[in-house]
Image (cartoon, rainbow, N blue to C red):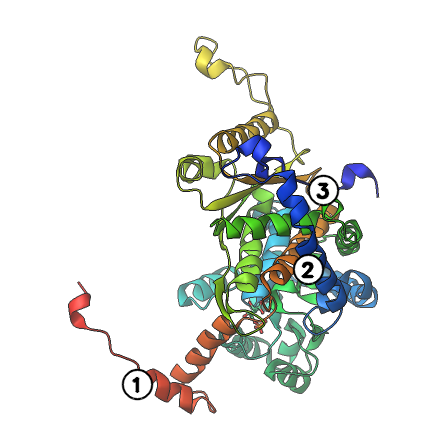
Amino acid sequence: MAKKETIYFDYNNMMADYVGEEQGFTDKELRAATQIATKAFEEVKAGRGQNMMGWTELPYNQAAVAEDIMTTAKAIKKNFDSFVVLGIGGSALGPMALFQALCHLHHNELPKSKRKAPKFYVEDNVDPERMKALLDVIDVKKTMFNVITKSGSTSETMTQYLIISDILKKALGKDFASHVIATTSETKGNLIKIAKKEGFKTFFIPDGVGGRFSELCPVGLLPAAVLGINIKQFLDGAKFMDNKCSKQNLFKNPALMAAVLQFLSMKKGKNISVMMPYTDGLKLMADWYAQLWGESLGKSTDLDGKKVYVGQTPVKALGVTDQHSQVQLYTEGPFDKVITLISVQNYRATMEISQGCEDIPAVNFLCGHTMNELITAECNATEYALTKSGKLNDRIILPEVNAFTVGQLMYFFMLQTAYTGALLHIDTFNQPGVEEGKNATYALLGREGYEQKAAELQSKKQKAEKYIL
Ligand code: PA5
C-alpha cells in the first residue's frame, strides 16, 4: 500500500529531550524496556487466534462472511429507509465510531438521493425517553433492526429486542422476522435460540472475539456495509497495521512502542489517558477507545492472583472544541496524564475563510487562510503548549480519514491494548467488573437462577438518611 496511506505514531513528546527530564523518557530508558517489550510481544504473538484472541485473525478470515454481508447490505439498502442497531458496549461503540468516521456528518438529515443508504441509529441505552424518541422518527415497517449481543442475554439489548419485536409483530404479523437480523454467538446464549425459532437472518460473532474487540467481524461489518463503507478496505487497513506491527523490535513496532510508553507512564503515576482527535469524524473513535482501554486494562487482580488495581482512566476529548474546555487542565494541571492527539493531514473538505472585517486586523488575519490551516495550526499549538509545560503527549497521524486508515487505527489500538495488558500481566480480555453489574441487574429484576445474588443485594447495608441532603 502506498506510503501516503499509512498512519504514523509520533512519540517525540514523550521523550525527555522534548518534554523535559523530569517527565520524559530517555533513549536509555526505552532501551532498558526492550526486554519487557519482547516478552509482551511474544506473549501476544503466542496467543494469536486462541482463547479470547480470535480478533487477531479477523483481518484474514472474514472474506466469505464479508461477501454475505455485502449481499445482505445491498438488499437492506434497497428495501429499508432506516437501519437500527440494538446493542450496548462493544456491540454498539464500534458501529457508532465507524458511522461517525466514514459517513457524512449529517447523514440522517441528507435527502435520500444524497444519502444512498438508510438512516442509521444505534440504540445503546435503556432510557425510555430515547426509545420513545426513536419510535417517533422511524417507520418500523420500513426499518431493519440489527440486534447485536455476543452473550445473547444482555438485559439492555434483550429489553430493546422485546419492545421492538412486539411492535413489529403488531405492525407486520408473521413478516416481522424479515425486519430483524441477529448478530450473536453461534452456539451460546438466548438470542441464537430466538433467532432460530423466529427465522431471523443471523451473523455470528466468533467465540474468541469479545465485544470490544469485535469491530472487524459482523458486529461492525454489517452496519458499515449497509452504510456504503468499503469493508474490504477497512479489513485491509487492519491487515496492513498487523503487518506493520509484526516486528519484535520495539523501535520498529508502533503499537508495541505505544504500549510500552503508556506502561512506563503508568509507573510514573500517569493514570489518565486522554484521546483527542482533531476531527469530528473521529469523535466517537475516542468513545470506542475509552471502552477498549478502560474495560481491558482496569483490573484488580493480575494473572497470578495478586491484587494490583491497575488501569488508566480514559478521557475523551475533541480538538479544537475541548481546547476551550479541558486543555487548561491538561496544560497546567497535575502531571497525571498522557495526552494522545490524533491529527489528519488531508481533510475531506476544504473551507476557505472568507474576506471581511478589513478594518479589524485582529479578525482580518484569518482571511485568506482555510479552516484546514486553522485546525492544523491549533493542533500544533496545543501540542506545543502541552510540551512546553512538561505534559507527556504523543500523536497519531492519519493521512486522511478513510476505510483503510480507520482499519489501521482500530487495529493499532487493539494491539496496543493487548501489549499493554501483557506488560501489566493481567487478563486483558475479561470484564469481571461488568459481569458483577450485569448479575446484580438480573437479580434485582428477579431472573431465575440469581436468587443468591438477590439475597446478597437484600442484605447490603441500607443507605442512611442523614447522608442524603
Ligand atoms: O467488551 C465487552 O465484552 C462488553 O462491553 C460487551 O460488549 C457488552 O457488555 C455487551 O455484551 P453483549 O455483546 O454480550 O451484549
Could you tell me which quadrant the C terminus lies in?
bottom left
Q: Position of residue 467 (x, y in %)?
A: 19, 66
Label located before the other in sequence (2 or 1): 2
Judged from the image, the secondary structure of the residue bearing numbered disc 3 is loop
Most extreme residue toward the left is 466
Residue 10 vertical position relative to residue 213 in the rendered view, above or below: above
| Badge 1 element | loop
**Amino acid carrying mark 3 in the image:** Ile
* Precedes in sequence: disc 3 or disc 2: 3
The disc, 1 or 3, on the residue closer to the chain's N-terminal end is 3
Where does the image place residue 386, in percent across and percent down from the top left? 49, 33
Mark linked to residue 302: none
Q: Residues within 10 Å of mark 1 (few under 14, many from 20)?
A: few
Task: Report if residue 116 is visible in the image.
Answer: no
Dot 1 corresponds to which residue? 459
Which labelled disc corresponds to residue 7?
3
Mark 3 to mark 2 CA distance (whole Å): 23 Å
